[in-house]
Image: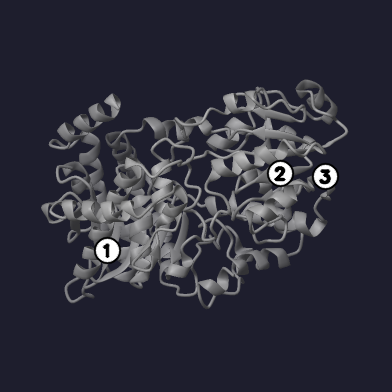
Amino acid sequence: MLKRILRRIRNYLGSFVPSEGEQRFVEVNRAFWKRFRPSAGGRENDRYVLIEASENPIINLCNASFGAIVCQARHLRPIYLLNGLRDRSTRRVLASYHPDACFIYTTSPRYLLAWLWTLFLAWRAWTRLRTPRDILEFRIDGIKFGDIIYDNTLVRGYATLRKVDSDVLSVLHHFFRHRHIINDIVRRYRLDSFVVAHTIGMFGGTFSRYLLKSGIEVINRVGSHEILVQKYRSSADVGFYPAKPERHHFERMMSLPDDVVLPMANAYLDERHNQRVSHIAVELAFNRNKRFFERREDFCQSTGLDPNKKTAFVMLHAFNDHPHSHFARPLAFQDYFDWFERTLQIAQTVDSVNWVFKEHPAASLYPVKDVDLHAMFAKVSKPNIVFLDADADFNALSIRFLADVIVTCLGTAGMEYACVGIPCLLAGESPYSGFGFTLEPETADEYEACLRKLDRLDRLTEDQIKAAKIVMYFELPMVHSTSYLFCPRYDYRQIVQITPPKVLADAAEMMQCADDGALMHQIDVLSGFLNDPDRTQFIDFERYPFMRDTAPARSVQAGRS
């Protein structure tokens, strides 16, 4: 808390005088984007693109530059949405992208006057909620928002919600304030589209759903140094995971000869499992300094499990990482913790398999204050149940040699180990559900029935393994492989420590040294995607020419069914 306060004070004081990095960036950036200004008599900018201005300097840089590309492609004016009236530095930076940019501040007097009214609306909604499950059913204006309210309460440090308390009231107040702001913006401006980094969370989730209801396109620009873009055009698109292959893309890849995609998928899987992929979860899960088990007998001897029984790996989630907001289909459980608790209860009554509960490798990044997993497992005395915490001396590559089934809600493990024939039981919608290689019970009772007969599951067929590899390759390397030339590349360690002046200094140097032709070409490629009504999911056709013949979805839902 103290560090956050000191950082805000430093940023506020620093905003009065531009840093050297900021000055360089503004100068270079303004000169680059100046070439796209309409000439006298050119098309009028009578419509706008609303652009999220994030407190994260990397996201802010990426949103602003991508928003500038949208402006150029569609002849729009940008509206930047900022939080602080005193954030002079961010305004100076954003103004360098377009000379006629508009700025809206969520803390302006126009919206502060609505503080008491939105508090009353929040209090009225709060008094009608009796249980945490009631939160999930919360709807207003014909739109479901219960998932956003619930998940944003979890983010405050909870694994689960046990009561409707003041935290829920506070989150509801934030929601009603966001609702007031976006409805005001829709009334005042002719919006063409909205550029946002996340369609979950309070800001992205609330704004996106109201804009889609109003017929305004939402452009979900994900990540930083890569191009991962998904267009949403109607309320029916809410909950489509941006990296998940649209149905026509999946069918195209499945129809290709086996020597086109599968060798690349196999090569990537090998790189991932051997920790040659730069990603925090990969580095933590497949840590080569941890013990690797290639023989079931060795693992069972180490853990006290029976080597003659089949083994189910239950892959736990970061409990407060938005269990409800990512997908359209409601989770059959109250949240990830409820799923885990129910699974553990059932496991204690099923002796026919070994149960290995594995904590999420990045759980420390999602701390909770209401659950102690070690204390919970200390009360479990069943010899066929073991718990591996995130610090356990265990390399997750071992799982491909030990597991007979993966149990998860949406964890990547269910997809990557399906690539080697291990079946996966899903307790909810995931980025890889619906492609025929996972078990997908629709209710908690059906899920329990599946848990009780895991010992009877067969390994996946060759066709199922192929489908798993196709989906895995699309979601993990393929849609993340194209570098975004307007953002410096940082690894997760640098991202945690980065400062706005450092990002701007790096960006200025990058643009000064960049190939101007490559930047212009990328703008042309992205403009083509943005202006193509048949494309809603960006694929780099130059890098993956075999996808050029993908049959376009004549409607968004046709490509996702």
Report the residue marked by disc 2. 406
Q: Residue at x 40, y 58 (%)?
A: 138
Q: Who's the residue at 60% across and 60% down the image? A: 544
Look at label 3 and name its amino acid: Asp
Q: Amino acid at mark 2?
A: Ile
Q: Nearer the viewer, residue 128 or 344?
A: 128
Nearest the eye: 398 or 386: 386
Does residue 136 show up? yes
Residue on which the image places disc 3: 455
Mark 1–mark 3 distance (CA, rounded to whole Å): 63 Å
Residue linked to disc 1: 36
- Residue 97 shows in the view: no
Q: What secondary structure is found at the residue carrying circle 2? A: strand
Label 3: element kind: helix
Identify the mark nearer the N-term, 1 or 2. Answer: 1
Q: Amino acid at mark 1?
A: Phe
Viewer-nearest of labels 2 and 3?
3
Instruction: Give the image's coloring scheme.
Output: one colour
Give SS at disc 1: helix
Spatial CA span between label 1 and label 2: 52 Å
